[in-house]
Image (cartoon, coloured by chain):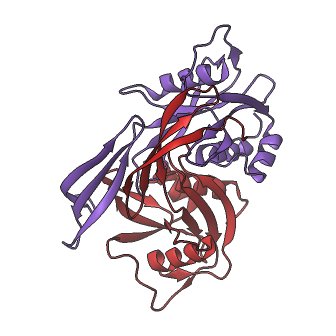
Chain colours: A purple, B red
Amino acid sequence: MKKFEEKTIRTETIYDGKVVKLQVDDVTLPDGKTSKRELIKHAGAVGIIPITKDHKIVFVEQYRKPLEKSLVEIPAGKLEEGEDPLVTALRELEEETGYTASSPKFITSFYTSPGFADEIMYLYMAKDLEPIEHPAAGDDDEFIELIELTLDEAKQYVKDKKIHDAKTNYAILYLQTLERM
Amino acid sequence: MKKFEEKTIRTETIYDGKVVKLQVDDVTLPDGKTSKRELIKHAGAVGIIPITKDHKIVFVEQYRKPLEKSLVEIPAGKLEEGEDPLVTALRELEEETGYTASSPKFITSFYTSPGFADEIMYLYMAKDLEPIEHPAAGDDDEFIELIELTLDEAKQYVKDKKIHDAKTNYAILYLQTLERM
């Protein structure tokens, strides 16, 4: 048995959508008592830090309906079923920015909200971007504006909370620790 | 009008639980077309990086039902309604570790999954921890083990994916960039 394992007694699927699935599990706790767990199932996602040849970071600004405001973030997207995260990273880079890169570097991965969701995010960095003449189009319902910023400008966006999400905060801190971009 | 705003035509609450609320909105997109958005509403959360007087970081290991495994994380917890995040941070520190601190430092905040959830996480750091003789008990359904690690040991946990979530990854990277703990 795994440490502190919570055994599932009963699973109820409340909603099975395009982005999330919500299920509520009745579980047995390590002390034998029971409890309920609300669980969001998600396919996983990829984020990519794109860096141009003149050392600017390419961000995307888009409206985030859960927050009812737009955020400036690094390009990101959901994994298709069974897809290698690197393939997702290159697709999102092309669709959202019109750039490609020959060899994105894997940086890290993390669960975004392990208390209630199983979403995992794979983070990549791509240097020496090349523009694509006819990039693939993104989703019909995505409206995106590109913003290229120096690291110092990006840090100001963090201060102003225009950059304000886990993967992008992590990206900025990561870049700040590199000696040069 | 906000940039790229998506106007809500109709909101349907699918589930209103203890931790999450799921709603599905019909929206008008900037080009006039319509789409659906699946939105997780969450009260927000706090994470705290606790550092002992002998420069060890205090982590908690607990079973994360969404992942069906235990993770090692910094202490964290959900905001009560209208609560100052600093109060939440000190409560979770006491309940989960049995320590207190006089002046936790606010580090940053971030949305954990802005594509589908409105959860915001406030991150603090607390140095010079003091043990509490009779700490308040945590939630009935939380089973936690404490692990004190040096920064180097914590980095090994990251490599082994025993540390593998956004706030804790961020915490390790943040500590790594400080000259000394």
Residue at the location (18% across, 72% down)?
Answer: A32
Tell me: residue B110, above or below residue A49.
below
Identify the residue at the far front of this view.
B9
Residue at image coords 54%, 55%: B119
Q: Decide which of A101, A156 is in the foreground and name it.
A: A156
Q: Quadrant where the C terminus of chain B lies?
A: bottom right
User: Which of A131 and B125 lies nearest the eye of the viewer?
Assistant: A131
Image location of residue A91, percent across then percent down = 54, 21
Q: Residue at x 65, y 42 (%)?
A: A171
Judging depth in this view, the residue of B82 and A90 nearest the camera is: B82
In the rendered image, the quadrant that contains the N terminus of chain B is top right
Residue placed farthest to the bottom in the image? B133
- Asked whether residue B52 is in view, the answer is no
Residue located 59% across and 80% down the image? B129
Tally the numbered discs.
0
Q: Position of residue B158 (x, y in %)?
A: 49, 50
